[in-house]
Image (spheres, coloured by chain):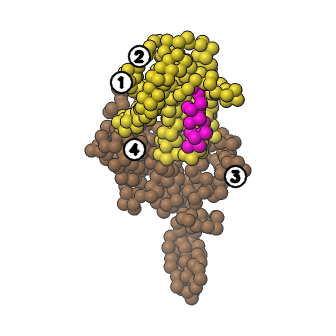
Chain colours: A brown, B yellow
Amino acid sequence: MAVREGAVNVLEAEGLIKKFGDKTAIDGIDLQIKEGDFTGLLGPNGAGKTTTIKTLTGLVKPTGGRICYYGKDFFSNPKEAKRFIGVVPQQSNVDRDLTAYENLYLHSMLHAIPKSLRKGKIEESLEFAGLQEYRDRQVKTFSGGMKRRLVLVRALLHEPKILFLDEPTVGLDPQIRKNIWELILRINQQKGMAILLTTHYIEEAEKLCRSAYIIDKGKIIVKGSPDDLKKDMGGYVLEVFLEDRIEEEFFNSKDDALVRLKECGHACKIRQVTLEDVFIKLTGKRINV
Amino acid sequence: MFNGFQGVLYRELNVFRKRAKKQIVASSLSPLLFLIAFGWGFGDRVAVNGLPYITFLIPGLICMSSLNQSFSIAQELNITRFYFHVFDEFLIAPISHVEIVLGEAAYGMFKGLLSTCLIFAYSVIFGVKLIIGPMFFLAILTHTFLFATLGITVAMLVRDHGDQATVNTFVITPMIFLSGTFFPVDKLPEIFKWLVYALPLTYSTKVIRATLTGGDVNTLYLMLIAGFAATFFFTALWAVRRVEG
């Protein structure tokens, strides 16, 4: 999808701070999400990703900073702003005792979808998620992947402008993970909905996100498109297998890396730079811990 | 306008519907045991305040049972908050906190009234005649609202299931035993009277018992229950707001 020049900002956050007691969970975060954007918020566990999402969606009040949806302050118009927001939390928080249909019906009531439209929209959602045959089954009989799909389409039911996904594929099998990513991509491309997701499956994020914010210890340490971020690193990595560790050297072209490989006396491997390398270089630690 | 209220109530009633049988059977057992033990055990040999003991006891059981049921939404809220995180759906939705509190309170009232009906059925079986008039409805609605909103307040303030159990052990159970459910509070030693007259159940038991047995309803007590109910409505509202801290 082409980058939309001059698209409107759905969300702007400025200097967001959240303290729990004397612990600072997020420390001055700035974010801008335009209509149709696909943005990743990447970082290790405990970096402040979930707190950021919770703050942006109104589940947690920030200690400081501003949040605006379409230029209007979130906290002075929470009801209006919440209509623009769809949330897929880290845990599939569907009602186990209710059926898939009832779960969606509840959402349609809470979001004041007119009664006459509810049934049609719910059927459409079930189809989009591939859950039509399970419509009247209690959610407690669902697999993890099915619950995830249900939570996803539930978040879309009221046609938000921006969808927040907190670790949408955590704890799922690789195949189901792929299936969920495809669904998310379709949501972004077919519905043109802006997406802000957090994940620590960084290789998946770099394939999908058109822009990424890397967060560590509650601060955004770098932002940009995955390609630009990788280019800044050089593009190619030479992994030198020393006796006790692996050393990584970065090069602007494959040829440069090859020259170095030939003169290097150790076992070596050349590969492309990943977002994870960007992260390690900036923070000195791995993301998947 | 009231879509949030309707949504919350829709959720709670539908979840209840799926477990209704189990819940109703479970909630019907303890009052029955009390009736057998105290009602038949003492039978009509004992008279309290000029009433046969069983006639004195049944209104008390109505208060106890409806309190238990209305307040029990606290446990359910705990599960939805800490375990399934379904409560977040309410907080994320564009609805007001007032609607959340009123929706949950209506559900608590529904549960309390259901258990009231159950005890009315027992009273027929045990041959106890009660007077059910508009004053009784006013009192029982206020009473169930009061304890439902107290339940919401507690559920929003506790940090886990353990805290919730502590509140039940140290607040709810003593209140039920001391507030005139099983015996008239006037018989208590002076020092306890101070305590029981600080508890809302004391007043609602007095009012509800008076309405059901043809006694005089003390208007001051009725106003006090209403005062407690209003207070707990605001604490519930404050506590829900606090969750988004």
Contact (Cβ within 8 Å) of mark 1 with mark 2 = no
Image-quadrant location for residue B125: top left
Camera-side mark, 2 or 3: 2
SS label for mark 4: loop
On whether residue B55 falls in the magenta region, the answer is no
Q: CA distance from mark 1 to mark 2?
A: 10 Å
Q: Main secondary structure of the magenta part?
A: helix
Q: Position of residue B39 (x, y in %)?
A: 44, 28
For disc 4, the marked residue is A96
On the image, numbered disc 1 is attached to which residue? B125
Looking at the picture, how far across and down is residue A111, in whole percent?
46, 32
Residue B129's tag is 2
Q: Are marks 4 and 3 in contact (CB under 8 Å)?
A: no
The reply to the same-chain question for discs 4 and 3 is yes
Q: Are marks 1 and 2 on the same chain?
A: yes
Q: Residues within 10 Å of mark 1 (few under 14, many from 20)?
A: few
Residue under circle 3?
A: A23
Query: Quick check: A245 above or below A124?
Result: below
Gap between marks 2 and 3 measured at Cα:
62 Å
Q: Amino acid at mark 3?
A: Lys
Q: CA distance from mark 4 to mark 2?
A: 43 Å
Residue at 34% x, 49% y is A141
The kind of residue tagged 1 is Ile
Residue B36 percent coordinates (x, y) = 42, 32
- Parent chain of label 3: A
Toward the viewer: B158 or A60? B158
The CA span between labels 3 and 1 is: 61 Å
